[in-house]
Image: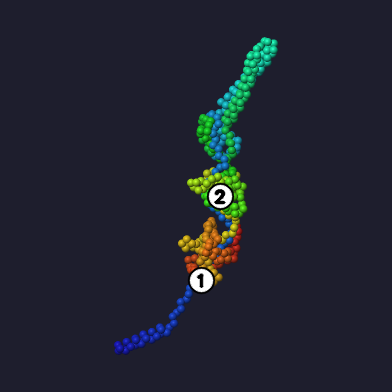
Amino acid sequence: MKVQTQKFLICIAGILTCVAGCTKPVERAEPPPPKVSVAHPQVREMIDYDQYNGWLDATQTVELRARVRGHIEKIHFTDGQIVKKGDLLIELDPRPFESDLQLQRDQKAIYEAQFVAAQKEEARLRELLGRGGASQSQVDKAEADAKSFEAQIKANEQEIVRRALDLEYSKITAPIGGRISRAMLTEGNLVNAGGSDPVLTTIVSIDPVYIYFTVDERALQRYRTQRESSGQPTTRAGSLKDSQIVVKFALETEEGFPNDAVMDFADNQVDRTTGTILARAVSHDPMGRLTSGSRVRIRVPTSAEHAVNLVPDTAILSDQDKKYLLAIDEKNHVQRRDVNSGKLLDDGMRVILPPMQGQVGLGPNDWIIVQGLQMARINYPVYPIKPTAAATQSAQATNVGQ
């Protein structure tokens, strides 16, 4: 019985083996190509620029000091207010100056009376000289006395002018218009005249305002070369103001570069220790919102307006020191496209520079993968999802607006 059972099992195993050998293997279905989002490079008119850090400075700054000695009687301004040229700011006690001025006027009256008496004495002696009643020496002395009093009158007139100036200087006025600082000395303090005495207050002009920044020597030479090749005035000394180079600048808290300025000055030599040169631009600020000393960011144009290709920065991949994009051909196969990347813009788009030697370059009609990069493999097909016509028109309108 056991022998029959073993034979039966052997027959069953043989039948199963034959069936398994005669059955065809099931073919494995290939997965569909991965879906990726593609788009054309954006074409935008742009101007190349260099960016620097700088600071604001007033075109005029005055440290106000007293020109005469006296006590402060009245302060006529409020700390931080806007003043106009000629406004009365500080008044010293005028009484000592008025007294000195009156004293000199009285002294002039005395000299004038003495001069008249001396002239009469000279005329009387000259008459007596003809009749032998006076000597020549007496006439000469009378003439000298008259001329002496005349000279004293003229000297006294100059002293009166000086005393009148002292009285005028007791009223300290604004030499320029602008924003005034706080009063360094209060009413009742004694101030002395001279440059070494304490500053009473300071005034800085408001409009226009200077923007100072330093440019490296290589950049300056590049600017000159570019302007010479374009036929525009160069930035040599004496011609920078005439070239009317417009720059953009922004305060630290501002987005973008909303303010305009015109370059009007570059220093006459390069700093040997830093290899930079000081440059300056001027901007109008009628509202007085720019404060002297504030830090700013500056953009200097380095080219004329030209068309550039832009791609999303997230679409650019790296291979060591090389940058590349994934593009698709007419058969929807992925191809590697090495590119020369430029600056990153505020909206996340990266400038693609002209191709270097050995690069194919990027055209406006090429399709590049912008989403799904991790699923795409070079030389393998993908299923591209292209933007709709409405989205394309919207992107073009955005480019025109920028």
Q: Secondary structure at mark 1?
A: loop
Mark 2 closeness class: few <14, some 14–19, many ≥20 residues within 10 Å: many
Image quarter (top left, top right, bottom left or bottom right) of the C terminus: bottom right
Q: Nearer the viewer, residue 397 or 382?
A: 382
Residues at circles 2 and 1 in contact by the CB criterion of under 8 Å: no
Q: Which mark is residue 381?
A: 1
* Picture residue at 59% right of the left edge, 58% below the top: 306
- Which colour style is shown? rainbow
Give the labeled residue for mark 2: 249
Residue 178 position, x and y percent, is 58, 40
The answer to whether residue 76 is above or below residue 32 is above
Q: Nearer the viewer, residue 138 or 169?
A: 138
Q: Nearer the viewer, residue 235 or 2?
A: 235
The answer to whether residue 205 is above or below residue 308 is above
Q: Secondary structure at mark 2?
A: strand
Give whichever of discs 2 and 1 has the lower sequence position: 2
Residue 261 position, x and y percent, is 58, 48
